[in-house]
Image (spheres, rainbow, N blue to C red):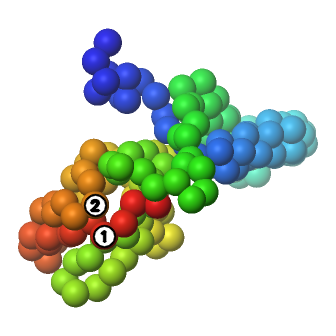
Amino acid sequence: MTLQQDINNQVFLTKKGLEDLKKELEELTKVRQPQLIKRVATARDFGDLMENAEYASAREELSFVEGRIAELEGILAKAKVISEEKKGKTKDAVALGSKVTVAVNGAKHDFFVVGEWEADPIAKKISHSSPLGKALLGKRVGDKVEVEAPAGRLIYQIIKIH
């Protein structure tokens, strides 16, 4: 198995990201799903199921929750926790879990390279499979990477890897 195949078969998460998904799964399976099952049963008693909007709504919501539960179970089955660097130790190259300071167009930005499920551009968490994430992986301080963006090509220079 090549490294790329290994990456494709795994879901990379930080320790906090893994904990958050486990909490969401627990909330869905222990609280939300049982509530919806009761709601479906109660709505079933309202009469004709063909004309019962409450029943249809409850079934639809239950179906959504069950789909999300299956999705989370699949993610957690493939989850691999990103090893986070020990404080005070600088990495030589950008990897999953790295915090990277880059300069672009005269401004400095910090990004945290994470797995796809934790990506949040507003919080400066970029996926390792995003154009910028792919360009940064394996690069070192001082390296420049070119990324195609909607505004055109941007050149990022790596200032620091935390």
> Farthest top residue?
1
Query: Decide: marks 2, 1 in contact (CB < 8 A)?
Result: yes
Residue toward you, 104 or 20: 104
Picture coordinates of residue 62, whole percent (x, y): 71, 41
51 lies above or below 71:
below
| Left/right of residue 142 with respect to residue 61 in the rendered view | left
> Farthest bottom residue?
106
Q: Which mark is residue 49?
A: none
- Of labels 2 and 1, earlier in sequence is 2
Residue toward you, 147 or 145: 145
| Residue lying at 50% horizontally and 70% vertically, measured from the top left | 123
Q: Which mark is residue 159?
A: 1
Picture coordinates of residue 110, whole percent (x, y): 41, 71
Q: Amino acid at mark 1?
A: Ile
Q: Which mark is residue 141?
A: 2
- Asked which secondary structure carries label 2, the reply is loop
Let me know if residue 61 appears in the view.
no
| Left/right of residue 90 with respect to residue 142 in the rendered view | right
| Residue lying at 31% horizontally and 24% vertically, measured from the top left | 3
The quadrant where residue 100 appears: bottom left
Picture coordinates of residue 49, whole percent (x, y): 74, 38
| Residue lying at 46% horizontally and 60% vertically, measured from the top left | 162
Picture coordinates of residue 69, whole percent (x, y): 67, 35
The quadrant where residue 19 appears: top right
Q: Amino acid at mark 2?
A: Val
Q: Residues within 10 Å of mark 1 (few under 14, many from 20)?
A: some
6 lies above or below 85:
above
Residue toward you, 31 or 120: 120
> How many numbered marks appear?
2
